Image: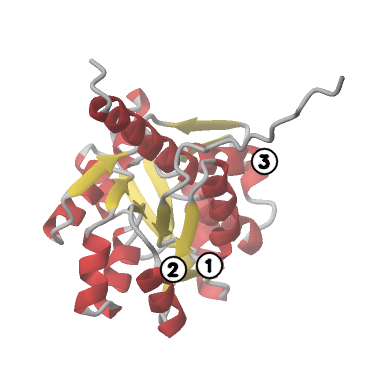
Amino acid sequence: MHREIKATTKVLPLSDWTVVNLRASTAQVAIGRIARRYGAQSLALPGFRLEVRNDGQVIEQLRAALSRGTGLFVSPMAVRACRSLLPESLSRQRMALAVGAATAKALRLALVAEVRAGHPETSEGLLALPELQAGNGRALVMIGAPDGRGLLAAALKQRGFVVDECDVYARVPVRLDRRHWAALSAATPPLALMLSSEQALRNVWAQAMEPQRTMLQTSVVVASSARLAAIAKSLNFTSILQADGTRPEQHMQCLHTWVQQNVRRSDGAP
């Protein structure tokens, strides 16, 4: 007697969703893999590309600053750029500060002896660290890109730190073409938008026509911080969630949790 075998298809939690992400093109493949693990489709509208500022003046500024103070790295790209510009500099650092777990991981891979990162994985989380409550004239080197963490630098200066900002890479705006907008127009609801950069959102928003803006405003925004959530609200986005940090996995988990909660409510669960 033969037993009939029925094929079953596993329904993933976000199988109907399209997730719009604004990160640099180099991050799109990894983000797509993460989205597919939840069953979602990833739609790329890159707000910028990342470019190392490989010139002698930047290198000398970075070398001098790191000799005076503790490095504070705002992103994994800041770590990669620093390693590119001064290959041996990080392994000589006794301690470094990181915004987010991914940045901290990059520093450990660069053999920094001690790495400190806050929770949540944002500027606010870093500022909550006990060692950053009072500077008393201590020197910090904020390593990142222009217009990246101005509020963080200002807060640290108010607490008595001497902050030297080194811009080792740049976020260069990307000109979106008709293929990007056609992909957005072809997407079917529900939509989510992963928001981890104000500059990326404003670059995309400035290029979007009114129908495209309206479509984006229908999406559920998953923001990395309260500040970014407020920016989305100012642009008339109405459904806004806040993730635990900046990593795509955290954004997807936040959206998944929200969807599951709404499913339970619609099913009448308490």
Residue 54 at x, y = what percent? 58, 73
Amino acid type of disc 1? Ser
Q: Decide which of tag 2 and tag 3 comes sooner along the chain.
A: 2
Horizontal arrangement in the rendering, residue 94 relative to residue 126 (left or right)? right
Q: Which residue does the image show at 22% across and 75% down from the upper left?
A: 211
Horizontal arrangement in the rendering, residue 261 relative to residue 250 (left or right)? left
Residue 194 at x, y = what percent? 37, 52
- Residue found at the far front of this picture: 1
Reading the image, the residue beneath label 3 is 109
Q: Quadrant of residue 48?
A: bottom left
Reading the image, the residue beneath label 1 is 25
- Residue found at the far right of this picture: 1
Amino acid type of disc 2? Pro
Question: How far is disc 1 from disc 3 in space, using C-alphas?
Answer: 23 Å
Amino acid type of disc 3? Leu
> Is the Cβ of the residue at disc 2 closer than 8 Å to that at disc 3?
no
Q: Quadrant of residue 242?
A: top left
Question: Which numbered dot is residue 46?
Answer: 2
> Is the Cβ of the residue at disc 1 closer than 8 Å to that at disc 3?
no
Q: Decide which of tag 1 and tag 3 comes sooner along the chain.
A: 1
Q: Which residue does the image show at 63% across and 32% down from the upper left?
A: 113
Depicted 149 relative to depicted 102: above or below: below
> Is the Cβ of the residue at disc 1 closer than 8 Å to that at disc 2?
yes
